[in-house]
Image (cartoon, helix red, strand yellow):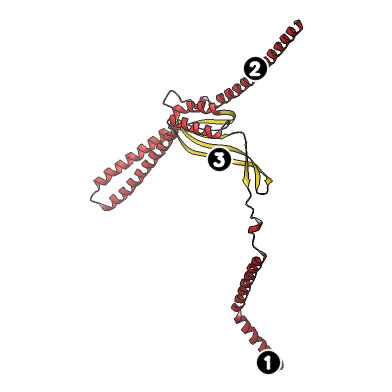
Amino acid sequence: MKKKALFLLSAGMLITLMGCQKNEAEHTAALKTADSVAVASKGMTSEVAKPLASSEKKFVRSGDARVKVNNVVQSTHRIEQAVSRAGGFVTQSDLESVVDRQEETQVSADSVWVTTQYHTQSTLTLRIPEQELPMVLQHIAQEIVYLDYRKLGAEDVTLQLLNQTLEQQRHQKSAERLEQKIDVNKGRLNPIIAAEKERSDKQAQADGKFIEKLALTDKVSYATLTLALYQEPAVLNERKALFNVPERLRPSLGFQLWENAKTGWSALEQVLSFLILLWPLGVLGTLGYMGYRRWARK
């Protein structure tokens, strides 16, 4: 009994020790995974992406990143939904599967086993409200398994916006002064025509500056982020049929001979038709030969 109890106690301790080692290994793997996700999450966020509390400075924020995810299709849909909830929009969304390698193995007389290795990838162009950019970047970070790279930039366009505003005001005031000049010279046609043309040019310049300002303001209000997603290559195995024509359905020898004979006759007709087109050359050649013979006799 003592030996049996000692054996059971030793076995229990051994099982407990193995279980502890397994749990420790799983815990270590989980920590490594969590660390990699944490690093990726930190890598997506940046001080560049944070809007300033002061409204005096205006920045055009843009960036691009390439990341690895578990499932490209699901991550693409979740990121698009996150951008939509943040008040942004998607200007481009390309999703495709690219074949890396394909092999065929015939398994029967009428079928083959096709093994295809492929990878799925997606390219997104996102327009995100400036204030919501950090939140969207954090959401994207939750999808990341591995971060290849991310680039974020903020261009200060405060003076550029101010310059466009001042130019627009100058052109607008010039157009208004020309309008007054036109009203004063109503009785004289030539000055009115010249002033109208100049006023139209000034107004067109003012409108152009206004549109440029709107375009730049849109870039300030909405950050542009280009995102490339990819995942681990996958393998697809499928069985496909071979479309071989059964031997009993093949044409007989007599039918093939008849078809070839008709084809040969059609070719002969075409040759004869072509030769008939050359009859003037034959007539000229005959007349020339006869003339030569008569000249030779003399």
Q: Nearer the viewer, mark 2 or mark 3?
A: 2
What is the secondary structure assignment of the residue under circle 3? strand
Q: Residue furthest left?
A: 187
Using the image as rendered, state which of residue 48 and residue 296 is in the foreground.
296
* Label disc, if present, on residue 294 of the rendered structure: 1
- Residue labelled with disc 3: 96
Q: Residue at x 50, y 33 (%)?
A: 77
Specify whether residue 58 is in view. no
Using the image as rendered, state which of residue 15 and residue 263 is in the foreground.
15
Q: Residue furthest front?
A: 1
Q: Note whether 277 is above or below 156 in the view shown.
A: below
Residue 58 in percent (x, y) is at 44, 29
Q: CA distance from mark 2 to mark 3?
A: 39 Å
On-image quarter of the N terminus:
top right
Q: CA distance from mark 2 to mark 1?
A: 117 Å
Q: Nearer the viewer, mark 2 or mark 1?
A: 2
Q: CA distance from mark 3 to mark 1?
A: 83 Å
- Residue labelled with disc 2: 23
Q: Residue at x 54, y 28 (%)?
A: 143
Q: Residue furthest right?
A: 3
Mark 2, Cα crowd under 10 Å, few <14 / some 14-19 / many 20+, is few
Position of residue 162 in the picture relative to residue 39 (left or right): left
Mark 1, Cα crowd under 10 Å, few <14 / some 14-19 / many 20+, is few
Q: Note whether 160 is above or below 259 in the view shown.
A: above
* Label disc, if present, on residue 172 of the rendered structure: none
Using the image as rendered, state which of residue 248 and residue 167 is in the foreground.
248
Residue 28 in percent (x, y) is at 64, 19
Sequence order check, earlier mark of 3 and 1: 3
Sequence order check, earlier mark of 2 and 1: 2
Residue 205 in percent (x, y) is at 38, 43
Q: Residue at x 65, y 65 (%)?
A: 256
Q: Note whether 23 is above or below 173 in the view shown.
A: above
